[in-house]
Image (cartoon, rainbow, N blue to C red):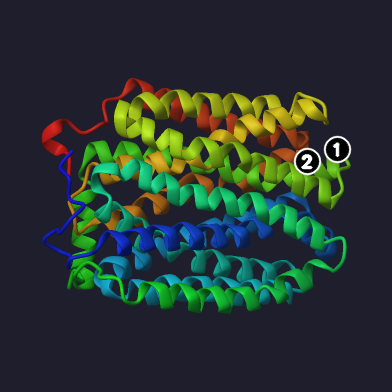
Amino acid sequence: MQDRENVTPDTEAITKGQRLTLLIVAVAGHALKHMFNAAFFILLPQIKDSLGLSNTQIGTLSTFRGLAGGFANIPAGFIGDRFARRRAEILGGSIILVSVFAVALGFATNFWTAVIAASLFSVAITFWHPSAISSLSREFASRRGFAISLHGTGGSMGETLGPILVGSLLGLVTWRVVLQGSVIPGLVFGIAIWAFLRSIPTAQSSGASISGYFGSVSTLLRNRKLLLVLIFAAGFAGGQSTILTFLPIYLNDDLGASSVTTGLYLSLAQVGGIVSQPLIGFASDRLGRKLILAPSLAFLGLSFIVLGIVPSGWMFGLVVLGMGAFLFPLMSILLASAMDLVVVGAQATTVSLVFGSAVIVSAFAPALGGVLADSAGTEAAFMLAAGIVLSVALLSAVTRWQPVASDSH
């Protein structure tokens, strides 16, 4: 793979210190973003009880949230490439808006107001990825899998700390207060991200028009190998979103876990990922994405099945820990796989396609999981998630989708 970690045609000179600052801020900001994201899932049982929602409505809420975030990838990718020089404003503004819409969710009084607030919350989250990940992909081209995995590790750290923090706060205040108070850290850290990044050189803005952007998307979608990676991402995200939606419901309704215990289990799901994510990224750079992705997806799907079988306690915790070693890290490998197949200048667009494709399955899987959970028990939602992920594991194993040497960028 060609090394472009010095000066590339589309970027100004960037020092090693600035590159390190970019990496640290991207990882830290991603951690904060996922603390907000984790708060949503740990609060779901409280929101469900407070608003009197059924499992089907909870699944539908996740579906709308997924659709909103998925379709938001269209403008997010365009803005990430078209206004690359506004990276500091995009990333700082994303964190601020996430906290603002969290406050709006905290004021929700019925199902539809919760849907609207949660959907806008998801839209704000979406704008982080294209700008952050495309920047890391450009500046760490020869270590792309490792750099993107470190970014993902930040997300795992946020998903680990978030449930513990929120679960503890729920013992003191209501879910509404938790959400409404989140605006303070959102404003503080959003401004800090802007301040740290505003002086670091960025890529030239693409200058593409909206029609040019959609033309670029059309070109990318004619790449068969990229299409396969998008299918893998959609299936992975479908299983992931279903598990994240119904694991806290299962703990609360079926196992009778307290909010603190639920938070600890959800945090445990991230502990393995904090350790495994950079290792998986490093291994994928050295051994190839396919050799890492296919067996990892298979293990993840099997862990979903076991979740609904083992009793609560240390055995359940062990399964959650093993599942967590792959639950978030694999998205980093999927992103790196997609980046391997595209040219510099279309990377934010490619990130938006990866996350946007996820909506195809991930937005509707929780709704279907909710119907199954109401009719056959929460374990049925786990089986749905397992079936989706095992299917894409098989597809990734039997198809040829890695770039040949001449395709690498």
330 relative to 45, above or below: above
Q: Is residue 43 visible?
A: no
Q: Quadrant of residue 45?
A: bottom right
54 lies left or right of 319: right
Image marks 2 and 1: residues in contact by CB distance under 8 Å: yes
139 relative to 290, above or below: below
Q: Which residue is the site of mark 1?
A: 255
Q: Amino acid at mark 1?
A: Leu
Q: Quadrant of residue 370?
A: top right
Q: Nearer the viewer, residue 85 or 81?
A: 85
Residue 163 in picture, x, y percent from top left: 71, 53
Name the quadrant of the C terminus: top left
Residue 90 in picture, x, y percent from top left: 39, 73
Q: Which residue is the site of mark 2?
A: 250
Residue found at x 29% / y 43%: 143
174 lies left or right of 165: right
Residue 372 in picture, x, y percent from top left: 70, 38
Q: CA distance from mark 2 to mark 1?
A: 7 Å
Whichever of callouts 2 and 1 sits on the residue coming sooner in the sequence is 2
Q: Nearer the viewer, residue 263 or 126?
A: 263
319 relative to 273, above or below: above
Dot 2 falls on a residue whose secondary structure is: helix
Q: Amino acid at mark 2?
A: Tyr
Q: Residues within 10 Å of mark 1 (few under 14, many from 20)?
A: some
Name the quadrant of the N terminus: top left
Q: Is residue 219 visible?
A: yes
Residue found at x 43% / y 33%: 280
Residue 389 in picture, x, y percent from top left: 51, 31
